[in-house]
Amino acid sequence: MAIDIAIKLREYAELTEKALDGYLTDENVPDKTLIEAMRYSTLGGGKRIRAFLVISFSGMFGGSVEKALPFACAVEMIHAYSLIHDDLPAMDDSPVRRGKPSCHIRYGEATALLAGDALLTYAFNILSDNKNVSDKSFRLSAAALSDLAAHRGMCGGQAIDLSDEISSENDLFELYYLKTGALIEAACLLGYYSACDDPNPDVVEDIKKYARLLGIAFQIHDDILDVTGDPEVIGKPVGNDEKADKKTILYFRDLKSAEKLEYDLTVSAVDAVTDYADSDGPCQLAIWLMSRKK
């Protein structure tokens, strides 16, 4: 029976939110403002797509929510840190995130920097404290997450974005994979590793293909929303890319062609994993993401 993706997303988001709330307490924290800023930027918002992927890919390969949830929280903390730093004046200079003031607007740039640093570092504490998986699963997951979030992954993509050295559509796709797809790949792999500490290379390649294509499609949809979206729904102003003279997919294609490309990438992502048992969650998520309004 096909799952109801909206219900399942909400269920996993609530589980993740509760777990994150438990991790981000002010117990034994010397500076309460710092933990407040960490909580402000991590809790109470977002679709928890990466957490959904961790839990769903774990279930695809016989894992459990108990095994996957700490890994899901670690990925969400790294995602939150990246958004805090993305919004800073030295990066995207965005004053609004999810319909409320960005972390640096609410707490100041110095505290925002530290909140991001603390979330990044603490994520690996959460990862290492997962007592429901084997030591090998932890090592595989730590290696994947650290690599895909660092200079060869997400941070490398952010550096390319800042350099504005995009001269072709393929350059743009590589940027989108690194900036967005790499952390999605980490989420999918961590789900698999939470269930399996002896990974099959062919399975890993299928997971990577799904994540890479989904990441590019996800970013293309963001480009489209920046032109067609409702600011009140998105939670931030639209038209920012054009104002900043950023090259997006709409620099290389018209709107109709961009929408067709997003569809084709999504279909290919689904094809990469659809033959696996219990792949309904990741497959339906990919399709649902094409219809999102924020």
Image: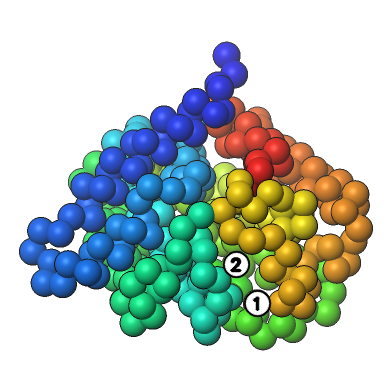
Residue at (90% x, 49% y) in the render: 256
In depth, the one of 133 and 40 nearer the eye is 40
Name the side, left or right, on which 26 lies relative to 63.
Answer: left
Residue under pointer 1: 161
Residue at (29% x, 49% y) in the render: 20
Q: What crowding class fits label 2: few (fewer than 14 Cα within 10 Å), some (14-19), or many (20 or more)?
A: many
Residue at (46% x, 73% y) in the render: 85
- The N terminus, quarter of image: top right
Secondary structure of the residue carrying tag 2 is: helix
Compute the Cα span from label 2 to label 1.
8 Å
> Which residue appears farthest toward the left when viewing the image?
28
Secondary structure of the residue carrying tag 1 is: helix
Dot 2 or dot 1, earlier in sequence? 1
Whether tag 2 and tag 1 are in contact, CB under 8 A, the answer is yes
Residue 121 x/y as whole percent = 30, 69
Residue under pointer 2: 179
